[in-house]
Every structure is written in structure tokens, then in C-alpha cells.
Image: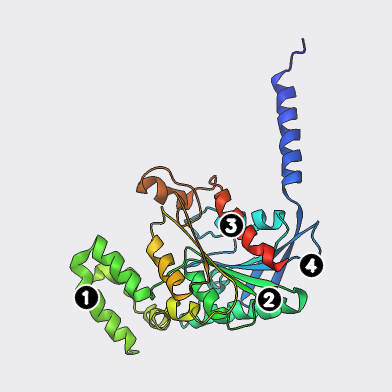
Amino acid sequence: MTIMTKHTLSLIWLFMSMTVFTEAQNFSSTEISVNPYIDGTLLIPESTEDPPLVILIAGSGPTDRDGNQSFMKNNMLKKVAEALTNDGVATYRYDKRIVKQLKIRTFDKNIRFDDFVNDAKSVVSYFKPSYSSIIIAGHSQGSLVGLLACETEVDGFISLAGAGNPIDKIILEQISKTAPFFVEDTKRVFEILKSGETTTDFPPALASIFNLETQPFMSNWMQYNPQEHIEKLEIPTLIINGTKDLQMTTSEAQLLKERKPDAELVIIENMNHLLFEINGDDLENSKSYNEMHHPVMPEAITVILNFMKQFN
């Protein structure tokens, strides 16, 4: 009978962990700056010749290439990228331009939603000469950004927890559920923004939405109706949402599907906005936004990989 000391077990565990880690990453990683605004990471599978490229576009806020913000660390986009590339799909994910601006402390107060769209188009144009198939996968706000960027020639589109309604309607619905006494004020401010004007006349409680500096950005964002733009797509389209999504209900995905009947719609049970599995309540769901240990649901990766087979 062999007796193993704690030191021996630790060495064995370390060796096994290193072996698993090495075997799990079958790709090369390269840092690429597409332009002065966009820095990102390109993952290329080692065993696939001429793989399709998925460009991952992050959601709202100062979100980096991995899906994180200063006080919200979950690595959601990094997990998606690595899972796809491990299965033969090249991926490029990038920091939103505001991330770089915050790092170098030169934040542009005049930034608009259209700037995000132009950034995505620049990424497509940069990689187009190198890949026979390029697919945009936009998460949350990035879904609409990706839809608009599809005006640049791409081969497929994936909406991950994307909205079907314009942002003003989504915010109104959220306020009607959480703070219905602010609904009329919210409607009034949105009407002002739709006219191209700004205002300081709003309840202080709504400052996070209607901060004077962000009103032009919101006004620009409100111009776009995701349903109208997905209807124009003439490329293969995949729409994914989860039943535990606190931000984009499955009805948002259904709206996109209704306007593009030939799109593939997949609703995943117990998947939240970050593509994580949540079996508990809303508190568990909310906590997951700042937890690193959650894996992306395998069902989501499988659905994306099956969709990608048509581009091989």
C-alpha cells in the first residue's frame, strides 16, 4: 500500500491542473489594435484551417473585451470566446472605446451610440481580407450595435440576449415595474430627447438614466428600432435568450424572431443575461454579475457551434 503525503498530493494536483489547463486551450492568442480606439484579443484555433471568425461585441457601459467592468467581474465574453475557439472557431473580442479612454483618462463626453457602430464596422473591415466568413455576435446592447454593423458585408449574425424594442421603450417598461410613479416623467423626458433637445428637468432619482452629459448618447441610441433592422438582414441569423434574463425577457427575442421568421430562435431554460445557469432567485442571479466561477451554459455554446457549421 502506497502512502502519499500532503506534499506529494499537492504536486500531483498541480501537475494534473497544469495538464488540464494545457489541454483545454487549443488556440493561439494575439493582441490586436484595430485602430486608435479599439484594442482586442484574437484567438485562432490550432487545428482548423481557414476557420470562420466570430466578432464579439460587448453590452452597455464601460465593458471590456472579457465582459467586465470596474465593479463587475465575470469574464463572460472571455468564456464564450475561448469555448468557441477551442471548437475550431476564431474569435475577436475588443474593449469598448470608453474603456481605453478611461484608462488613459481622456474620456470623450461627446461619444454617441453611432461611434460604437462605427467601431464594429472598423473591426469587420480590418479582418475581412483575412477570413472567408465573418459572423457578428452582439451581446445585450452589442446586439443592436452588431445589427447596424451588418451593413458592412458579413456572413452571419448572432443576437445574445439582445433587445427587440428601442431602448426608450425598454426603460419605460422597467420603470413601470420598479418605480411606476416616475413613468410620466420618463415619457416626458424621452419626448424631449426624441426632438433632439436636452433637459435638466427630471427627478433626481432618474439621474442615472438622464444625466445631462449622457442625454445626447441616449437620444442617438433611441433612433434605432432593432425590429426594423433585423427585418432587413439577408444573412443567417441566430437569436439566443434565457428564461432567467433579468434585463431582456424572452419576449424581446420573440419580437426579433417575428420580424425575421427565417432566423433561428433558441430560448434556454434557466439561463440569465450573462449566459450563466441560475437555479435560484433574483438575488443569486444579480450576484452572478460579479462572480468569476460561473461557466457559460454548454447549451449556449452548442447552439452557436451548430449555427457556425454552415460557415465552415
Instruction: Indicate the amino acid at tag 3.
Output: Val
Res 253 quadrant in image: bottom left
Q: Residue 234: x and y, percent?
A: 57, 79
Residue located 41% across and 49% down the image: 285
Position of residue 276 relative to residue 263, above or below, is above
Viewer-nearest of discs 2 and 4 = 4
In-image side of 176 versus 111 (left or right):
left
Q: Which residue is mark 4?
A: 50
Q: Which residue is mark 2?
A: 34
Residue furthest top in the image: 1
Disc 3 + disc 1, Cβ < 8 Å:
no
In-image side of 92 versus 118 (left or right):
right
Q: Residue 273: x and y, percent?
A: 45, 57
Q: Which residue is mark 1?
A: 185
Viewer-nearest of discs 3 and 1 = 3
Q: CA distance from mark 2 to mark 4?
A: 20 Å
In-image side of 274 versus 36 (left or right):
left
Viewer-nearest of discs 4 and 1 = 4
Secondary element under disc 4, as helix, strand or loop, is loop
Position of residue 86 relative to residue 280, above or below, is below
Q: CA distance from mark 4 to mark 1?
A: 53 Å
Q: CA distance from mark 3 to mark 4?
A: 21 Å
The mark nearer the N terminus, 3 or 1, is 1
Viewer-nearest of discs 3 and 2 = 3
Quadrant of the image for the N terminus? top right
Disc 2 + disc 4, Cβ < 8 Å:
no
Residue 303's mark? 3
